[in-house]
Amino acid sequence: MTQPSENLVIDAEVESNDGGYRQAPDEGARRSRSRGRLIFRRFLRNRLAVVALILFIAMFAWSFIGPHFNATFKGDAHCTPAVTPGLPGYDHTCMWDYKQNDFSSFSDGPSSKHYFGTTQSGQDVYAQLLRGMQKSMVIGLLAAVMTTAIASVVGSAAAYFGGFVDRILMWFVDMLLVVPGFLIIAILSPLFQGSTWLLLVVLIAIFAWMVTARAIRSQTLSLREREYVSAARYMGVRPARIIARHVLPNIASYLIVDVTLNVGGAIITEVSLSYFGFGIQSPDVSLGTLLQAGQDKATTAWWLFAFCGGALTLIVLCVNFVGDGLRDAFDPGSATSRAR
Amino acid sequence: MTIADDRAGVVRPDADRETVLEVSHLEVTFPSEGGRVNAVRDVSYAVRSGEVLGIVGESGSGKSVSSLAVMGLLPVSARISGSVQLRGRELLGLGDKAMSRIRGKSIGMVFQDPLSALTPVYSIGAQIAEAVLTHRKVSKDDAHKRAIELLDLVGIPNAAQRAKAFPHEFSGGMRQRAVIAIAIANDPDLIIADEPTTALDVTIQAQVLEVLRTAQEVTGAAIIMITHDLGVVAGLADRVQVMYAGRIVESAPVNEIYYRPRMPYTMGLLGSIPRLDDKDRAALTPIEGNPPSLLRLPPGCPFAPRCPIAFDRCTEVEPALLPVGGEHHTSACHLAAQIESENLAVTDVFPEPEIPENPEVRIPRERRDEVLRLEGLVKEFPLMKGHVFKHRVGTVHAVDRIDIDMRSGETVALVGESGCGKTTTLLQILDLAKPQQGRIVVLGKDTAGMSKAERRSLRRDLQIVFQDPMASLDPRMPVGDILAEPLSAQGISGGRAREKISELLALVGLEPSHADRYPTEFSGGQRQRIGIARALALEPKLLVLDEPVSALDVSIQAGVINLLQELKGRLGLSYLFVAHDLSVVRHVADRIVVMYLGRVCETGTVNEVFDQPYHPYTQALMSAIPLPDPDREHSRRRIILEGDLPSPADPPSGCRFRTRCPRRVGLTPAEQEKCSAEEPQLLEVGDDHASACHYNSAASMV
């Protein structure tokens, strides 16, 4: 299209003929403009989900802020400095962190010195718990986003292109589905000793995206038949652009819900890997390693197990409630979020 | 209970007829995100036994909701007030259990979609028998016998055998017959039919309407027929009431409504429907604007913003439904008396818009450029079986050797029942690929030897407008982006594109400032205008219109048809128009191609073919289109096709239409032999008019 066309010049005649159609869309329609706001409002009607979301955010924030509000002690220059640092050299006011050992208290219960007690080797459980929560939640969120991202690319491409591409990709998906992912990670983990924990995120995602990909594939299969997709094709729009602009935005609601629900799964995977010693390696901690360390003392030194067990349960519950709430908010037929 | 003794009920004189259903001051509201929606407002009416009441209205007018309220089928969130009395018994406030005893016994129901009305896991016979068993103490055998009797009554051949079939083995029309059989199984006092033919093809619609007529004669029940199509009720209803914005705005005996409408909305509806019998009308008279939102209605007449004769009072006081003129005629309009005394016609109230003509049409057809030519186009689909080892078990002959030629400035209509191959033909053209057999020549370029780049550039000249404007616009994209898509695909972006988008929106009668809104904010008609704007973005020469108005409400449809006509004249477009509604075709097309099972059976100029159809299939199609004119509808000759379209995987030998052909009955065995042995070719039967029948003969069907 280079030269301007004389055909499409606005003509006064049209305006007068179709004056009635120039009126603004009516008020009822305008209200539906911001779908995001509508979904947010529907989400707010689900009390449990709202409480869960607030709790999740609070726990996430606490896991980063909390370590700065731990009990203090007098230590040397190598300890984590407290909020009010003392004189340089020695006699610092220090704050317990997750690596520090308190050689004056082993396996002590909660006290003002150690809010959540200490481990057998004198580590501060409060600091360890928060560090573990931090790790587990960050890994969970990242792995969930990555899982859904891989799934949406593979699923939508397989469905959109169909035929050969579809068969190859789905064959790959089926193969990964029958491979015991947990075992593979366990076997591979010595190879990754000492490398970054981000690798763990990738590994968790690689073995978790297949079911989502299948769901996205079937959704794309029906979207592909929509007329706006055919329209785009007949206008000469390229496939990658069609997927990015027409297919994925239209399953966005599914993707968002999927991410939230995957967070719970990813956290559990991380925890169980770490529990068996394949995930986060000491001296770093995650909820999994903490649970592993605390499990055999659950009856004698309850604080070693109860705090991180409780935190894990709470996090996963919250994530699932938020996911359910989101799903209901997106689903126009659900009863819980309907206007009354 | 046998059928014979029920018939006595029908011949009762009018005066004796007792009131079956009396609805008074019915109000229904629903909760929504924006507040309560007043779906039905102060609706009162009565139906007497043996009477057929047509309720006509656009989507959202409250016609379905009011009847769902009668049946007690509204969701619990709905608030209902007023009174609904069935033979003197109050139905509102009855529990679901008590209503279940009435539904299916005293009230029979026929819904729009016969597939979802039947359970897929039980046989048809069992489902009808169940309807009998739930309401009567009879033995299973008797119930089954009754089921077969009913299936026979609704015209299902071989009833005893077909009763064992499951819903998926029935075609759409047969399913709807089965649903009607269930509805009349217990001799109801009232049958409520909610858009019973909307999902069906015209030829099947004619069959189903016929069955409804029979059902009414047999049971003597009152029928409430809910529809958006003024044509359907013209031949069936005794009385018609028109609903708008949740209210009844006009109610009268059927002739009064069609010949002496006294409410501008009714007049607008009548003026906006294209008719099979209008030859010379240049433009339809659309009702401008859109139906109001039922959320917080402004004071005054809800139709006032769209009414060409509204005055001050109309926006202040809502008119009451008052008697006007003829007997039992009521209208809710401040000006009803004036319309009555001056006897205003539709065109007096709604001025007929002027449509510019393309200067090209004056050039003789042969001298105009060719925009599209199909020569012996064939498209077959393999039927595959098996999962591990796929093998071919048959072939679907979707399109079988068809020829079409189209000149510039022309509208060619492709017509036929669903499954006749018209959509496949379209897709073949749009794909711009080498056809399986034959030739496709678009704007002088043969698609067979085309390179990728050539194909891409040809896409600019060939665009499509889809049937469903909701499905063809991506709901997640603002209108501006939707219109920018074809532009950016062909390398236009930035300021040029923005300018172009404003131009396009103005061209189709929308505000350029609407570019940042989403498709859901527009009404159906406006959305279809956006679809048209998108198709026009690249200034194509040939536009393929796939049933562009069939998903729209009548009052909106006229505006879109006029827009298409006007754009064609101003921009010099050519349209390939696919439709099943022959009345729309008569109005917009220059030439018509009638398809049956992948073959062309009749083709010619619209006037030739409509005035004198030669092929029996064309004749049947035309006779199946209802006319919005009760007298003509009652007096015209009707050809009702038997059965359904045969499977295109196994078409009949010889003439493909012979299995359903009404003309075959009058032929001698020797002549019939020719039909099954020899395939008829298109034969010239007039000036630019050809028909493929061995025994061509003309008949006027209007």
Image: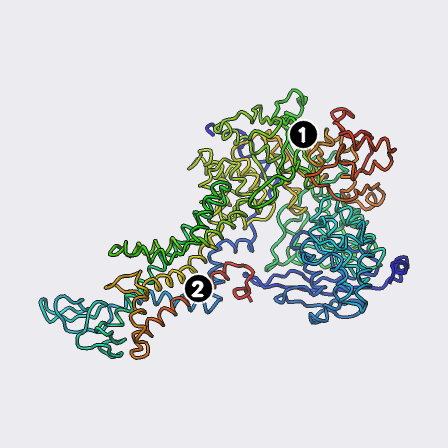
Give the quarter of the figure containing the C terminus of chain B. top right
Describe the colour scheme in one phrase: rainbow
Whether marks 2 and 1 lie on the same chain: no
- Mark 1 surroundings within 10 Å by alpha-carbon count, few (fewer than 14), some (14 through 19), many (20 or more): some
Numbered disc 2: secondary structure: helix
Residue B321 lies, in percent from the top left, at 74, 58
Q: On residue B91, which mark appears? A: none
Q: Mark 2 points at which residue?
A: A322
B457 horizontally vs B135: left or right: left
A261 horizontally vs B550: left or right: left
Residue drawn at x 70%, y 58% is B122
- Mark 2 surroundings within 10 Å by alpha-carbon count, few (fewer than 14), some (14 through 19), many (20 or more): many
Q: On residue B402, which mark appears? A: 1
Residue B195 lies, in percent from the top left, at 71, 52
Q: Is residue A214 above or below residue B591?
A: below
- As rendered, which of B148 and B308 lies closer to the eye? B148
Mark yes or no: residue A92 visible: yes
